[in-house]
Amino acid sequence: MIKLRAFGLFGLFLLFLPGLFSCDDEKIIATAEDDAFITVKVEKNDTLYGLVLHGFGTRDFASVSATDEEGLPYTLSSYNHYTYEYIYKTNNDLLSKTIPTIGEYNFSNIFLTGTTYSSTNYLSKDCIYPTAITTCEYDSTEEKINLEWDINGDADFIVIYLTDEDGNTTFVSNSINGSSTSYSISSDTDYWGNFIPINGTRYTVTIYMYLYETTGEDLNIQCRAENNSTVIWGK
C-alpha cells in the first residue's frame, strides 16, 4: 500500500511530486492505489452528493478508467497536470440529492511504459456531513485568518484549502485531527507552496472533513464533506 495518508488528491504531496520519484525511477514498479468516495455539500438547505474516483500511481499514467457496479464507465483525468495522479469528480451542476451508485468500482490503470494494473474498490453508503463554519475572519493585529467550526463527531481528519479569485489553490493545510474545531493561517504557516498571501485578495476558504473506509486509512477514503466561506486577506 502507498503510505501517503491521502495527501495526493488533498494537496500536500502535490507540492513535492515533481521530485518524489526522480531517483532510480526506472527501478520503481508500476502500481497504483485506486479509490472511490462520496462527496457531500449543503446548498440552500439541500444536501447534495457527488462521486470522486481517484488513482494515484508510482509511475506516469497514460490513462485511468473505471466502471461502477452497474457497468457505467468513467474516465479519469490528470489532477493539476500531475501524471502520477488522476481523478474524476461530479461537476457541481450535476450534484444530486441521491447518493452515488453503491458497490464495486473496477479500475484500469495504464502506464506510459505500457504496463497495466487493475484494482477494485468497494463504495458503501456511509457518509459524513458538513457542519457550520462559525468564524472566518482576518485578524489585522495578528495578521492571520482565524477559522472556527462546529464539531463533527464523525470526521477522521480535516484539510483546509484557500483558493484565490483566479481559481488557484494557494494554500492546503496539513492533516488536522478530526475532533478539531479551529485553525489559523498566517503568511508563515506551512503549505502555501509557491504562493504568498496578497493584501486585498478575496480567498474562498474550504474546510474538507474526511471519513475513512472501515477497512483502512491512507488513500482509503469513504466520504468527504465540504464547508465554504470567504475572507479578504488584510481586511
Image (cartoon, rainbow, N blue to C red):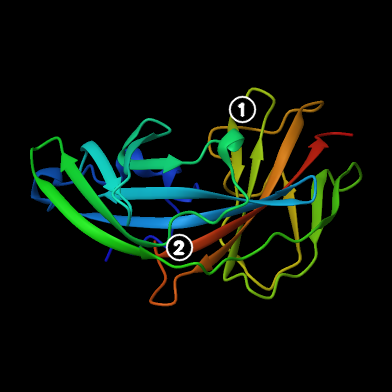
Quadrant of the frame with the N terminus = bottom left
Residue 228 visible in this rendered orientation of the protein: yes
Quadrant in which residue 79 is drawn: top left
**Vertical comparison of 26 with 78: above or below:** below
Mark closer to the observer (2, 1): 2
| x and y percentages locating residue 74 in the rendered image | 33, 41
Residue 221's mark? 2
The amino acid at mark 2 is Ile
Tag 1 residue: 167
Q: Nearer the viewer, residue 129 or 160?
A: 129
Q: Nearer the viewer, residue 105 or 215?
A: 105
The amino acid at mark 1 is Gly
Q: Earlier in the sequence, mark 2 or mark 1?
A: 1
Q: For the point 28% across and 47% down, which residue is it?
A: 66
**Vertical comparison of 183 with 187: above or below:** below
Residue 89's mark? none
Residue 10 visible in this rendered orientation of the protein: no
Q: Give left or right: position of 45 versus 190.
A: right
Q: For the point 8% across and 38% down, which residue is it?
A: 114
